[in-house]
Amino acid sequence: MTGTSVPSVVIAFAPAPPLVDTLTHVELTWIEKRIENWIRFGRPAHAQILDRSRRIVSFAPGSIFSFVRWASNDFGTVVSRIDVVRAVAPGEAYQTLPFVRPGGEILLRADGWPKVEKVLQHIDAVEAIGVNGADVAPDHWRHVHNRLVAGHMPRAYTTERHEAWLKRRECEE
């Protein structure tokens, strides 16, 4: 040894940052006459089939979808529910929902078949004027929720309201 030391160089690789999953995932199950979870409207960004009775659909942040859950047992219907949800971006506040990861902004929630049926009829009326439920103003879904909770009929969604929403959204961008 010559008495001179060579500094040792240690190379450490930083762990790769975890991949950020920006999608909202909804697990759908269909077991005839027992569990029926389905999407009434929405534009999935991705879909994955798990097996014959289960699949996962995923929605991009900001997209709106309707998630229907129905379940029964030997004595009749146990769960009848519909939620209209806005998928959230990472870091945004959200509400949790069964089968929805991480959760979303709940715009409308209805429990019990009579209320669920009214919401489904309202969705049919919106689609009858040529508007997809995923394109409807989020405020309208909140309006429908509030009116149903109060026991009143919600106002109809018209093409004029839809055009106003599109212009308002255009100004926000």
Image (cartoon, rainbow, N blue to C red):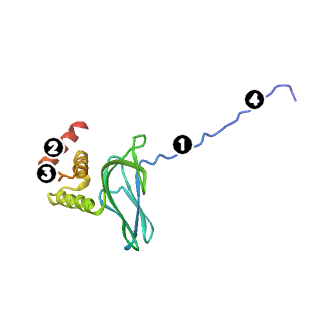
User: Percent x, y for residue 47?
Assistant: 39, 61
Q: Which mark is residue 158?
A: 3
- The percent coordinates of residue 58 (x first, y second) are 39, 56
- Name the residue type under label 2: Ala
Residue 96 is tagged as none
Residue 140 percent across, percent down from the top left: 22, 48
Q: In the rendered view, does 16 fall on the left or right side of 70?
A: right
Above-or-below relation of 173 to 155: above
The residue sitting at 71% across, 33% down in the picture is 9
Earlier-in-chain disc, 4 versus 3 = 4
Mark 3 against mark 1, which lies toward the viewer? 3
Name the front one of labels 4 and 3.
3
SS state under label 3:
loop
Question: Upstream in the sequence, badge 4 or badge 2?
Answer: 4
Q: Where does label 1 land, which residue?
A: 17
Q: Residue at x 43, y 67 (%)?
A: 54
Q: How far apart, in angstroms, are the residues tagged by discs 1 and 2?
A: 42 Å
Q: Quadrant of the C terminus?
A: top left
Residue 75 is left or right of residue 123, and the answer is right
The type of residue carrying mark 1 is Pro
What residue appears at the point 13 percent right and 51 percent down from the top-left corner? 158
Q: Quadrant of residue 81?
A: bottom left
Vertical position of residue 122 compared to residue 5: above or below: below
Q: Are marks 4 and 3 in contact (CB under 8 Å)?
A: no
Viewer-nearest of labels 1 and 4? Answer: 1
Residue nearest the observer in this picture, 125 or 59 = 125
Residue type at mark 3 is Thr
First in residue order: circle 1 vs circle 4: 4
Q: Label 4 near label 1: C-beta < 8 Å?
A: no
Alpha carbon distance from label 3 to label 1: 46 Å
